[in-house]
Image (tube, rainbow, N blue to C red):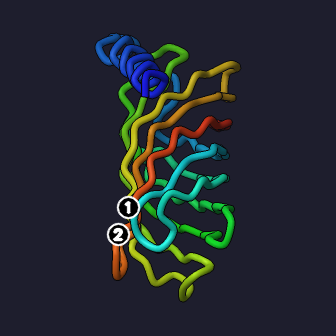
Amino acid sequence: MKKFVTIITVALVLLSSTAFAKDNYSVGKGDWLVGAYADVNRIWGGDVASQTIFTMASEVGYFVWDWLLPEAKLDFGVTEGANFELFTLGARAYWNKGNELLPFVRLNMGVGSAEIGDRYTRFVLNPGIGCDYLVAKNVAIGIQINYEAWIAGNLSNRFDIPIGFSIYF
């Protein structure tokens, strides 16, 4: 728990340090994002309660304004007896003002399927916050803090903190 609180505190400090800068955006309207990330997390509730799961995801988005990036995301999760797939659409809102940090909030919704049920029969809500750090002009590493709710006959929940790699072009 102490580690989780430390990670959240660091993420909030990084996000707030760029929220009030007055320079131009380092990425913006007309740019694309292609990214991937992975992590290990826990599921609770529903059919696969208290399972440890390894998750990999890919995402693609396009800045329609300097601060708004609609995105599509595809997740795959692997655990003992409960592998899943997830496809969501949503958007990120950035508030960076011209430096290497690209903080954002996001909200995605979509459909998911688990090995234990029918394909793509579960509604998924997936909000989160994150921050990418540009290590080169268009290459970033980042971290996100996400919540995921699988809504079907019963509710499954998941918090994850994935680390990822993104290219902005």
Q: Check disc 1 and give the amino acid type.
A: Ala
Q: Are marks 1 and 2 in contact (CB under 8 Å)?
A: yes
User: Within the image, what quadrant is residue 92 found in?
Assistant: top left
Question: Dividing the picture into quarters, in which one does residue 142 lie?
Answer: top right
Residues 83 and 107: in front is 83
Give the labeled residue for mark 2.
155
10 Å crowding of disc 1: few (<14), some (14-19), many (20+)? some
Whole-percent x, y for residue 137 in the image: 67, 21
Of pointers 1 and 2, the one earlier in the residue sequence: 1
In the picture of the structure, the residue carrying the numbered disc 1 is 149
For label 1, the SS is strand
Say which residue appears at 47% left-offset and 74% top-offset: 47
- Disc 1 from disc 2: Cα separation: 7 Å
Q: Is residue 74 in sight in this rendering?
A: yes
From the viewer's perspective, tell me whether residue 139 is left or right of residue 147.
Answer: right
Q: Is residue 160 above or below residue 14?
A: below
Residue type, label 2: Leu
Furthest residue toward left: 20
Residue depth check, mark 1 versus mark 2: number of the one nearer the observer: 2
